[in-house]
Image (spheres, coloured by chain):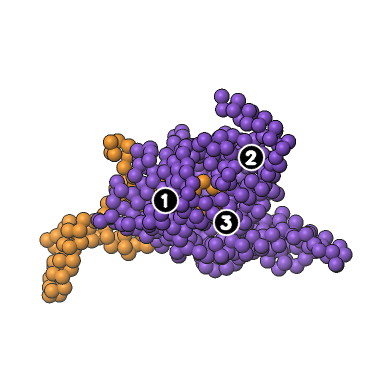
Chain colours: A orange, B purple
Amino acid sequence: MNRKLERLISAYLDGEVTAEERREVERALERDPHARRFYEELRQVRALLRSLPEREAPAELEESVMAYARAVGGRRRGQSWWAGRPALLAAAAAAAMVLLFPAVRGELDRLRAAEVGVAWFVREHTVQTAADPLTDRAYLAVLFTEANLTLAGEQPKSEEERR
Amino acid sequence: MRRAGLVAAMVLVASAGASQELPTPLAILRRAVEAPLRIDYEGVRVMTAVRQDGAETVRVAVWHLHPHAYRMEFLSPLRLAGRLVLDDGSATWHYEPSLHLAIRGPSLARPDPSQVEPVPENYVARLLGVDQVAGRPAYLLALLPKAEGVTRRFWVDRLTGLVLKWEEADAERGVYFTSTFTRITFGPLPPEIFRFHRPAGVRVVELSGKPRALARLSELSRAVGFPVAAAAQLPEGFRYLGGGVSRFGGLLAAVLWYSDGATTVSVFQLPSSRMAAPPGGESVRVGSTAVRVHTAGYLRVAVWERGGVRFAVVGSVPLAILQEFVAGTDPDLSAEARRVEGVAREMGVTPDRVADLRDRGLSFAQVRESLGASRATNQTAPHRPAAPSLLDLVERFQDQIQPLRSHGPR
């Protein structure tokens, strides 16, 4: 399967293909088992990533990982350190998958970029529109600050929360 | 009631006109554009704008110190109340007390009066009469687009030239934005109130400054590492202002700016391998291209993918104008080369000459117009001064905006 088809399948999942491209993807999915597998994997990765809540790792986790790393550094070779720690092994495997498997990592970055894409475009547009003398600066400030908050990873409190 | 007042005011203008010369609409507009650069004021503004789920009214207290300093304190609705924006003309501080967060970014307070130069070409300016806003007499000025676009009305203070009230409308949405001073006073203000004093314990976030400006598309392509597509066709009246490199974290996009003198449209381009389709938005088809249209306040953002490039066009314009940008932007390099060859043959010039004009952001129609004007100039008497061609105007425009674009934090 070539890169063009991979890109088309990705666009197909985004709903961004022309009628002709859609037919091309659907023909490939019928005939090509590699294309089917790629489609299925990409679909599952997306579904999984979209369903995951985004949370920052707690500070204690970082500390405990560093403590483990120091402990590992102090051990002799050949000792089966992982054997008694299945949960950590699973977490490390997941982390390795994300860090080392470029397709997954790339797709994760791509989806994250999509989440902030509209706010990024709006903010950059308002900065440019500020040169336009016939634009209301106070309303530009509303658009700009709303986009700022999304890009800073924040959302203003809702009316209910503030009451 | 308001209409009756307006009619009365127009009668007043008509009777006053006999004894007192009224300024021309363009003279009023020029004065309005320059007013914030020379006067100080403080007041309360009420803005109403369409949103995806209806309309929202925002109240904000505004202080302005000429030429470029602003302080804005948002009063309502509740979700915005307490938000503070301080702009000293070189940077903006956005303080969000409910989140204990301050965000520093580029200034929004540097209007460029030269940007309205194409207005007489693309709009009809009319003086509709005299009205009252916040207890002050104001000229009521209308800018009517010659092609499809945004109709604007401005209530311009007779004494100071400041715009006291705005109104924007298009054929699709009707009046989609109004902004009016409910109270205003003029006079000097203490510079101290325009400085940000960071409250203790507030987290500060720096968000990127203005995009790095590069006028030529070839320079822009080198800077972003992929070929940037120039719009092959543009909505009537729009011209290429320039381009820039926009960054957010590890993301890098090329952005091209277009304007008809009163409305700015931004076109973003980045590899679609770096950004999936943003979630949400309404689905629209432009030819065979699937487009998602998102809204942010009165702005519309159309996002699509073509040839491995993620495109987005942003502006407060009718959907038809966004669709023209979508239809006119094609990243296919071989199609571009074929069209360049075709126009070169048609106009009797080398393909390099056409490619050079395309590199300056001209659409194919503008390339033809520019080459036609050059040919006509060459055929006229050599001593007669030629009218500036479209290319001259574009170059002059780009020269004027370049220093302003370069200003501000990177």
Q: In this figure, which residue is indicated by the disc labeled 1?
A: B71
Q: Identify the chain of the residue marked 2, using the numbered disc in the image.
A: B
| Distance (Cα) linking label 1 and label 3 | 20 Å
Q: Residue at x 14, y 60 (%)?
A: A85
Q: Position of residue B370 (x, y in %)?
A: 74, 59
On screen, residue A56 versus residue A109, left or right, reads: left
Q: Can you identify the residue that label 2 sits on?
A: B142
Residue B287 image offset from top left, x and y in percent: 61, 44
Q: Give the mark, 1 or 3, whose residue is nearer the N terminus.
A: 1
Q: Quadrant of residue B307?
A: bottom right
* Figure quadrant of residue B372: bottom right
Secondary structure, mark 1, is strand
At label 1, the amino acid type is Arg
Query: Could you tell me how far apart the alpha carbons at marks 1 and 2 are, in whole angstroms?
Result: 28 Å
> Residue at image x 52%, y 51%?
B39
In the picture of the structure, the residue carrying the numbered disc 3 is B112
Q: Earlier in the sequence, mark 1 or mark 2?
A: 1
In the image, A159 versus B172, the foreground residue is A159
Q: Position of residue A163 (x, y in %)?
A: 28, 36
Amino acid carrying label 3: it is Asp
For this orientation, the residue located farthest to the right is: B381
Circle 3 crowding by C-alpha within 10 Å: few under 14, some 14–19, many from 20: some
Q: Nearer the viewer, residue A33 or B301?
A: B301
